[in-house]
Image: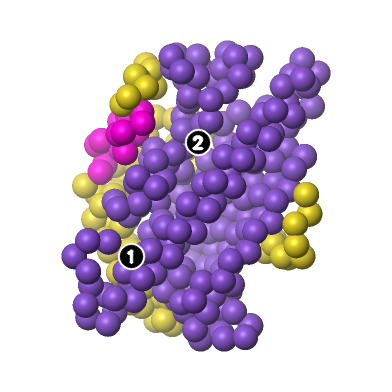
Amino acid sequence: MVVYTQEHVYRHPWDRVTAAAWRKFTDPASRTALSHVADVHTLHRRLDSGTGRLHAARSITVRSPLLPFILRRLLPSAAASPNGAALCHCVETSLVDAQRRAMDVVVRNVSLRGIIEVEERASYRPHPDRPDEWTQFRQETTIRCRPLAALAAVAEKVETRCAERFLQNSAKGREVVERICRYLEAESAGAAPSAV
Amino acid sequence: MVFGRSKSSTSTTPSAPSKAAAACSEMRAAYHECFNRWYADKFAKGQWQRDDCTDHWHKYRACLEEHLEDKHLRQILLDAETSTFYDRPETDPPSGQGAKK
């Protein structure tokens, strides 16, 4: 099992950063940076209008890293793909508490769970030093390969490869959120740039 | 199979080759536009009493119910409305005590 934690301070207020975080995967201008994301759909949403809590679940379909042959055979879509890439489904569940100004996002894979379990937990909170101006972002990624004896030899390689990929994509995701924040800032100042 | 695509097209095409994506793209776009505006202008700023996007959401969801193919995702779509699965409070956020590799 490998666990990575990452932190980042956005020099933007919480409401802007979380608005940008929602747009991360659906913003047309982000598609080049986040080209591993093939498709996003909202599967569930619920607003608790009494407490100001918003729950949502989205599917995120990602292009997997190139898989070793043995895993390709287990994932029909990968077996059909000439280069061993495949589409994997993840589910992202979010809870935003507007009253407490807290956003928590958990992403888990639903494909290949018998082989590997990836969980990415992220939180967005007002920064303790400048709560109205900055936002503290924390993310913890856990990657666990299932102990299948036949796959033991490749398991470690897969964990490492997945971890590298997730870390690269997390960094890209932060850049995208930063860019959308700048866009929203300009927009709220009444001078939205024509191109994001 | 929809997944068996050439290398060049997977690296350049932004959208997935799924039926749901094609059939529901307009409804999804309308819902996202509504949601993004509502979230930024109202919800995140403390006006959470009213959900402005329920009409857009119901149309989009009905489309997904018709076109979503993947069985895992379908199950979540269908279960979520009736179950309390997503109502559980999230567990603690990452503690941020440095890398725990």
Neighbours of disc 2 within 10 Å: few (<14), some (14-19), many (20+) = many
Q: Position of residue A37 (x, y in %)?
A: 42, 41
- To which residue does mark 2 refer? A89
Q: Quadrant of residue A38?
A: top left
Residue type, numbered disc 1: Asn
| Residue projecting furthest to the left | A194
Neighbours of disc 1 within 10 Å: few (<14), some (14-19), many (20+) = some
Residue at 63% x, 14% y: name it. A70
Residue at 63% x, 64% y: name it. A7
The answer to whether residue A23 is above or below residue A91 is: below
The answer to whether residue A173 is above or below residue B9 is: below
Identify the chain drawn in purple: A
- Whether residue B15 is in magenta: the answer is yes
Residue contact at pointers 1 and 2, CB within 8 angstroms:
no
Residue at 56% x, 84% y: name it. A131
The chain to which mark 2 is attached is A
Distance, label 1 to label 2, CA atoms, is 23 Å
Rendering colour (chain B): yellow
Q: Which residues are magenta?
A: B10-25
Would you say residue A158 is visible in this rendering?
yes
- To which residue does mark 1 refer? B36
Residue at 57% x, 23% y: name it. A67
Would you say residue A41 is visible in this rendering?
no
Q: Quadrant of the C terminus of chain A?
A: bottom left
